[in-house]
Image (cartoon, rainbow, N blue to C red):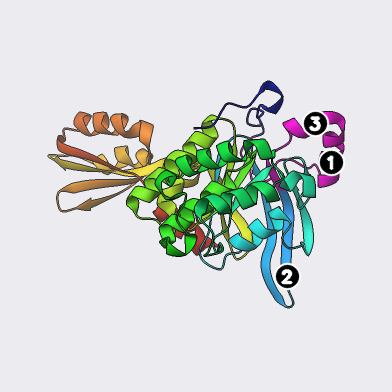
């Protein structure tokens, strides 16, 4: 799909820093100093501390702190109005923060030269209706100041990548919303960016188109590109993301891998009969239990403890007809986090 990066362009491995909300106690000034000493490759792709944005008396973003490692697909989740798009604009330097600090690819957010290394697909965009898809891509090659001798090849590759090879000479005005979304993604991938920021990239696509975009995102990660996926669609995060942050009311309320966000604990349903004695005292150590129409439901049990639970029930004389593990979904956890915030 894309040529591999050369040795001097190779994306660094993901940071070894634990996946907490804050990277550490370093300030953005210290990261700038590290960059000046050649430390940019070791810095996170995105790093923010208490990032804040106010529009007159409205607080759009408050105390946003997060770390995005190089080479990972990072999901940025939150309900509508949580401040996601404002955060993206701050990271790209399209608006200026009211407070806090943000670093992108080892430089302060908005740095002009750094922005050349970032691909961006906004949620809402419009291309000139009278241009063809090929002309739109050529225009952006010019804007990016890419070597003119490579423009035809880059445009052909972009059209192929987003599935528009047969529509390259079609005028954008005749494109469906989904096709325009694909073209926007093609523009974002021009120039071999180190960081690709996607704002609701699948919102206008049908299931086939969504699957295609996921494949593109996964291919980006395989070649070391960092992908920042801003979305409210939980299934998109579940399909492709390595880690994610959940924000609400302008603040980060959780960050981690999907397993860390959902939690290690779940529940299990056992269809069981013939339990005797004070069996509930033996089961109390596995979690909280309830009896429902011939089923024993144990909540808060760690997944690795289910075989031990089954063995204990058998030791107590129980006859087990069925065991049904029930894991908390990302949607369940997402709604739980929003309720807590």
Quick one: SS at disc 3? helix
Residue at the disc numbered 2: 54
In this view of the protein, which residue sits in the foreground, 47 or 120? Answer: 120
* Cα–Cα span, label 3 and label 2: 32 Å
Task: Residue lying at the far top in this picture: please name it.
Answer: 7
| Left or right of 278 in this view: 80 | right
- Give the mark toward the camera: 3 or 2: 3
Quadrant of res 154: top right
Rendering coords of residue 333 (x, y %): 44, 53
Residue at (72, 48) in percent of width and height: 115
Identify the residue shown where x is 70% and y is 38%: 147
Number of callouts? 3
Residues rendered magenta in the picture: 18-47
Residue drawn 73% across the image and 78% down it: 57
Tag 2's secondary structure? strand
The tag earlier along the polypeptide, 1 or 2, is: 1
| Real-space CA distance between mark 1 and mark 2, rounded to the nearest whole angstrom | 25 Å
Q: Which residue corresponds to mark 1?
A: 32
**Is residue 39 covered in magenta?**
yes
As for residue 232 lying within the magenta part, the answer is: no
Above or below, comparing residue 91 to residue 20 in the picture: below
The C terminus sits in image quarter: bottom right
């Amino acid at each position: 799909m894309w040529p591999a990066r050369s040795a001097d362009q190779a994306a660094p491995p993901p940071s070894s820093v634990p996946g907490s909300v804050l990277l550490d106690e370093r300030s953005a000034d210290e990261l700038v100093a590290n960059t000046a000493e050649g430390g940019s490759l070791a810095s996170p792709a995105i790093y923010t501390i208490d990032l804040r944005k106010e529009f007159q008396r409205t607080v759009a973003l408050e105390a946003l702190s997060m770390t995005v490692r190089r080479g990972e697909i990072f999901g940025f989740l939150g309900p509508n109005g949580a401040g996601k798009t404002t955060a993206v604009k701050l990271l790209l330097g399209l608006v200026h923060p009211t407070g806090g600090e943000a670093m992108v690819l080892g430089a302060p957010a908005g740095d002009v030269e750094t922005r050349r290394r970032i691909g961006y697909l906004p949620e809402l965009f419009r291309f000139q209706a009278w241009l063809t898809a090929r002309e739109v891509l050529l225009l952006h090659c010019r804007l990016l100041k890419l070597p003119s001798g490579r423009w035809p090849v880059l445009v052909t590759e972009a059209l192929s990548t987003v599935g528009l090879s047969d529509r390259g000479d079609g005028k954008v005005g005749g494109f469906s919303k989904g096709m325009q979304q694909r073209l926007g993604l093609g523009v974002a991938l021009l120039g071999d960016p180190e960081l690709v920021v996607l704002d609701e990239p699948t919102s206008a696509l049908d299931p086939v188109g969504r699957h295609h975009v996921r494949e593109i995102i996964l291919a980006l990660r395989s070649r070391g590109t960092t992908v920042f996926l801003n979305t409210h669609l939980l299934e998109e995060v579940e399909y492709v993301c390595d880690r994610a942050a959940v924000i609400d009311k302008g603040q980060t309320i959780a960050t981690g891998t999907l397993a860390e966000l959902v939690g290690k604990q779940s529940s299990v349903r056992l269809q069981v009969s013939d339990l005797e004695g004070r069996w509930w005292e033996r089961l109390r150590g596995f979690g909280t239990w309830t009896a429902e129409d011939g089923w024993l439901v144990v909540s808060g049990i760690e997944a690795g403890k289910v075989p031990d639970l089954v063995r204990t029930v058998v030791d107590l004389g129980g006859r087990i007809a069925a065991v049904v593990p029930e894991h908390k979904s990302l949607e369940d956890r997402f709604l739980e986090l929003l309720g807590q915030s």
